[in-house]
Image: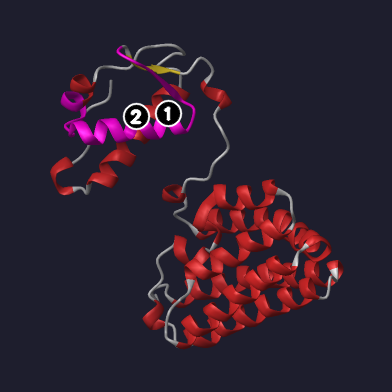
């Protein structure tokens, strides 16, 4: 078993939980903890890694959610019978570089262009009203100086819901709010002079998508979504570059 986590007293509990879960996950995937092996007791993990009982329990819960661990009442936690069959997920804590974020954006292109096209063909009046309501709220938030990240996410998942296929919206919800790139990597937005115009362009691109969906024009909706995501990818590259220290 690995040594204690570095400087546990100086790290927030969330970081300690993530670090412990990552350490145990690595040992499970590497086969150091074979399938059906019982994990050390809570007390043993606390002493080995120098963390609290809460951190241990939250780390085990995270591993269980990933399908790596199963718990048995009164018996403890065990490595899953086949840890390789864990569910697909994207860990926002692991997205530390622009390259990784852009990989997720490529995945979004594959899914969301089709979602926009299907939404145009299948949307209900209630779906359309919801899209317009969210985009109006986003416009007001931007005008008030808010980055409107949550509303941006809500709009994309609402388009998924408008397809009538529950897997689109559940997939977007599953990969989570990391689908909005400006949430994932910290950017000093105060240093970006064009923040409001940038957000205004996003808002207008959303409007173009919604207009095509309202017109039931699947081709136009797909085109507008593709343009939005491709433009977002390029905008994000420029935003990150604007905050890179000059040599």
Q: Viewed as shown, does residue 80 lie left or right of 10?
A: right
Q: Residue 63 magenta-drawn?
A: yes
In the rendered structure, which segment of residues is drawn in magenta? 46-74
Residue at the location (33% across, 41% down)?
18
Q: Position of residue 127 (x, y in %)?
A: 69, 66
Q: Residue furthest left?
A: 9
Disc 2, disc 1: CB below 8 Å? yes
Q: Dot 1 corresponds to which residue?
A: 64
Badge 1 local density, few (<14 within 10 Å), some, or many (20+)? some
Q: Quadrant location of residue 159?
A: bottom right
Q: Which one is nearer the viewer's eye here, 201 or 188?
A: 201
Residue 47 in which image quadrant: top left
Tally of numbered discs: 2
Classify 226 as above or below 173: below
- Could you tell me which residue is drawn at 56 percent across and 47 percent down? 174
User: In the image, is 144 to the left or to the right of 151?
Assistant: left
Q: 67 or 130: nearer the eye?
A: 130
- Residue under circle 2? 60
């Amino acid at each position: 078993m690995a040594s204690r986590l570095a400087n546990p007293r100086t790290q927030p509990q969330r970081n300690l939980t993530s670090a412990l879960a990552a350490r145990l996950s690595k040992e499970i995937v590497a086969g150091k903890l074979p399938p059906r092996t019982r994990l050390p007791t809570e007390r043993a993990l606390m002493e080995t890694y120098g963390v609290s009982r809460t951190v241990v329990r939250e780390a085990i819960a995270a591993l269980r959610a990933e399908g790596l661990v199963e718990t048995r009442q009164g018996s403890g936690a065990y490595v899953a019978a086949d840890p390789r069959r864990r569910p697909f997920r994207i860990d926002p804590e692991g997205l530390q570089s622009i390259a990784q974020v852009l990989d997720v954006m490529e995945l979004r292109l594959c899914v969301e262009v089709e979602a926009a096209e299907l939404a145009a063909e299948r949307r209900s009046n209630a779906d359309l009203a919801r899209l317009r309501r969210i985009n109006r709220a986003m416009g007001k938030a931007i005008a008030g100086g808010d980055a409107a990240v949550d509303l941006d996410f809500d709009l994309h998942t609402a388009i998924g819901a408008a397809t009538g296929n529950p897997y689109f919206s559940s997939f977007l919800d599953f990969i989570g709010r990391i689908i909005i790139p400006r949430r994932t990597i910290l950017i000093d937005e105060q240093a970006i002079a064009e923040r409001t115009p940038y957000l205004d362009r996003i808002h207008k691109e959303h409007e173009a998508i919604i207009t095509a969906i309202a017109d039931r024009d699947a081709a136009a909706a797909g085109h507008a979504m593709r343009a939005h995501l491709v433009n977002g990818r390029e905008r994000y590259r420029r935003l990150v570059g604007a905050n890179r220290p000059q040599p």
